[in-house]
Image (cartoon, helix red, strand yellow):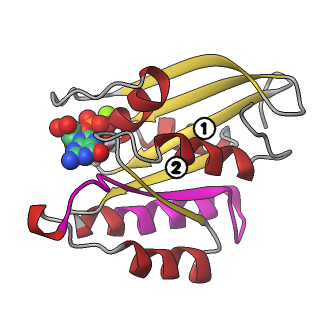
Amino acid sequence: LSGRPNTVRLLFLGAAGVGKSALIRRFLHDRFEHKYTRTVEELHVLEYDTAGSGKMRLEILDTSGSYAFPAMRALSIRHSDAFALVYAVDDPGSLEEVRRLRDEILELRGSKSAPITVVGSKADLREIEGRVLLAADVMATVEDEWDANFVEASARTGGNAVGVFRALLQQVNPPRRLS
Ligand code: GDP
Ligand code: MG
């Protein structure tokens, strides 16, 4: 539960290099950079107007794929309102990591379900450019077996970056809509 009223905490998790920071940067600044900055952990705090429920304080926690701080990760998982589990469409191992992270979240929260949005990142990549994971296949698993949200997005083109946040906010309790 959030400490302040109308605060929504979003946690981004996933293997290193899948595009978590790039997606957040695209959403916040509508920019994309090719350089890869190794993130340890970064908290972005913003205020947004919502449709119907006034102002919302949004806390976006960007994490690294490294597990040097398992206790910190467990704490973050306990204190978040919704989870973006990010994989890259050219990296099957990163989807396995998403599966593992989901198990960890369910176990820590002692629940069979959680407000999870699985994000297929780097959606701009075509098969000739390295895409190996197809949206339809992953969506079937995520929506039918996991009962989680599924979206694909590209920080590079900006395609559906906002959709990632809409999906996350739709899952928090009570659901929020950006105005
Ligand atoms: P993070 O470790 O998950 O935060 O990953 P980053 O956001 O730092 O991105 C890792 C690398 O993937 C960078 O070199 C980015 O330029 C690249 N990248 C990120 N998003 C995209 C995307 O939407 N499309 C493509 N083609 N590359 C991306
Ligand atoms: Mg990062």
Q: Residue at x 63, y 51 (%)?
A: 167
* Real-space Cα separation, disc 2 to disc 1, in angstroms: 7 Å
In terms of depth relative to the viewer, which is nearer, 179 or 19?
A: 179
Q: Tell me residue 3's x, y (percent).
A: 79, 25
Residue pictured at 73% horizontal, 50% vertical: 170
101 part of magenta stretch: yes
Check if mark 2's residue and mark 1's residue have beta carbons within 8 Å: yes
Asked if residue 20 lies left or right of residue 7, the reply is left
* Region of the chain picked out in magenta, as a range: 97-126
Q: Earlier in the sequence, mark 2 or mark 1?
A: 1
Magenta region includes residue 90? no
Q: Could you tell me which secondary element the residue under label 1 belongs to?
A: strand
Q: At which x and y percent is residue 91? A: 22, 63
Quick one: SS at disc 2? Answer: strand
Which residue type does callout 2 highlight? Ala
Q: Where 17 sits versus 151, above or below?
A: above
Residue 84: which disc? Answer: 2
Identify the residue under disc 1: 10
In the image, what residue occupies the spot 11% across and 61% down? 129
